Amino acid sequence: MFRFLFDRDTWQEVFDSFSKNKLRSILTMVGVWWGVLLLIGLLGSARGLENSFNRLFGDFATNSVFIWGQNTRKPFKGFQEGRRVRLTLTDVKKVEENVEGIEFVVPRNQRTAKMDRKFLSGNFSVAGDLPLLDKVQKKKLKHGRFINETDIQTKRKVAVISEDIYKQLFEKDEKAVGEYMLINGINFKVIGIFKTSNVSMGPSSDVHIPFSTFQQIFNQGDRIGWIMVTGKPEYSIKQIESDAKLLLKNLNRIHPDDKRAFGSFNLGGEFAKVTGFLTGMQFLTWFVGIATLIAGVFAIGNILLITVKERTKEIGVRRALGATPFEIKRQIVVEAVFLTIIAGLLGIISGGWILILLNHFAGQGAEAVIVNPSVSIIVVFIALIILVILGTLIGLIPAFKATSVKPIEALREE
Amino acid sequence: MLKINALHKSYKIGDSSLHVLKGIDLSVEEGEMVAIMGSSGSGKSTLLNIIGMLDVADTGEYILDGLPIDNLTEKKAAVYRNKFLGFIFQSFNLINYKNALENVALPLYYQGLNRKKRQELGMFHLEKVGLADWSDHLPKELSGGQKQRVAIARALAANPKLLLADEPTGALDTKTSYEIMEFIQQLNDEGKTILMVTHEEDIANMCKRIVRLRDGVIMEDKKVTQVRASAHV
């Protein structure tokens, strides 16, 4: 039954009717071409955006919330309102132990300090951190290492500095790891240089020193600046946030309804908005792409219907010369599928070009909005299969129309 | 060759029906050249269409070369048309985007012949109508007479038992008409059975037998002495 597909004459006929009606055929194909182009272009761009988001957020535990102390707004248990609330290491421990679904609780301290190195100096923010920070906010180290457990235990005076500070305090191409610099007049040994991230989660720090060292040199005691709470993926970060806050209010004798005592920033919530947007966009892309594709295929069917009407007489002649209705139908369906596939392939190719152009103009460098815009080959195959099926179905309409006219009436047509 | 008995055909027009053929009896022997004449509405075209299996009779018998033509499905009719019949139309009905050779070879395509064979046979028949040099020309590049000769070559291509011509000279001037008729007479001389519908007396007189229809019945059926077209050219 499908032997005719390998028959040169079938294709000769298709080629003839195509090349003799070039403009009409090309116009017919524009619809499908455009649909496929849109589908590939949009899907690729959506993937590119997703890749770029993943690259930006990839280094962060996105299921996180920052919590810090502010001033109370309600008197409670004998305390006046307006009391300054400071979180302590005890709070960290309690949150870690009592709130359900917690992965990490990272205490953080930060303040501004003057830094000197030979004749260069500047004011930068310095943070006291645990090695744990690297787990929730991956530092991309260019050289050296991050703070480790021994640094904490022995309160070593070591510093991990950002690329920016390195540029400001060190000579070009100078080796920094192992060198010393002054922080508030105290000598610190540089143990690592990290790359500055594109997105900052909370206040950014230029220099990281061991948590214990920070406590000591700034006379911090148990007090901490803020905590970063990371939830396990299966737990809702919103729930963790309110649980943690309620617990902290209890521990610090704050009115349970006091909304201003703790400030917070829910990273998970923000991130969910972005990923939700991406999912929405992908859905929209498929919807628009497939709808355009269907519209394009219908356009082919529509034009073939007109073509068949125009060719009524020709079809009548062919039937008078001995073409069976099946042969006529088969020919028209083959033409429809052929046009759809060629248009689809052209759409895939030009869609690919668009993605290449996008990648070339918007996809280069670390700041790129679109990273590696691409469409998987499976999607392309699915699109082609859909095209073949739609082309066949839509070709059947003009095919049946063509043979519904009796040859004698077709011949009478002018 | 061809035998028709008590053929009736009527068309429905709205609620009423129009009785076009009211019992036609006709038999044509091999090698005959018959002109079917009649005013418009006499049923001559309907008769030709039924003989050409483009239309089916309501009742009656139609036997072509010993083969009863009945219970025609579209597919069966197409196969019979392809095997047994060659059509020549008034308006030539060439396919305008195919060149002369491709047009001639088209019936052979539907016979399932391979390309080489089709080209050969097509060329052979084009040569026969004297248009071998025009084989790669499109119909629009040909004159009316040339187009009709291509159409005749196409009708001959499948080597049919019977040639059916519907006003073959209707769209041509007198001189070209006679040239075409001369050619058709030649074919008849070679033994082809030819049936043509015409309303021109001079053309009809170039056949060997004239069948006159009026209001769906045969008024007259007589043999005539053939006027040779070559005498007029």
Image (tube, grey):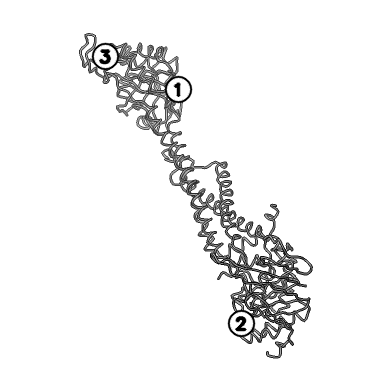
* Residue B49 drawn above or below residue A376: below
Tell me how far mark 2 sits from mark 3, CA to CA.
108 Å
Q: Chain of mark 1?
A: A
Does the image show residue B132? no
Q: Position of residue B107 (x, y in %)?
A: 70, 67
The residue labelled by disc 3 is A255
Q: Chain of mark 2?
A: B
* A300 displayed left or right of A157: right
The residue labelled by disc 2 is B172
What residue appears at the point 74 percent right and 82 percent down from the top-left corner? B186
Dot in front, 2 or 1: 2
Helix or strand or loop: what does disc 3 sit on?
loop
Residue with the most extreme top position? A78
The residue labelled by disc 1 is A135
* Residue B137 drawn above or below residue A145: below
Depth order, front residue of A305/B55: B55
Tell me how far mark 2 sits from mark 1, CA to CA.
94 Å
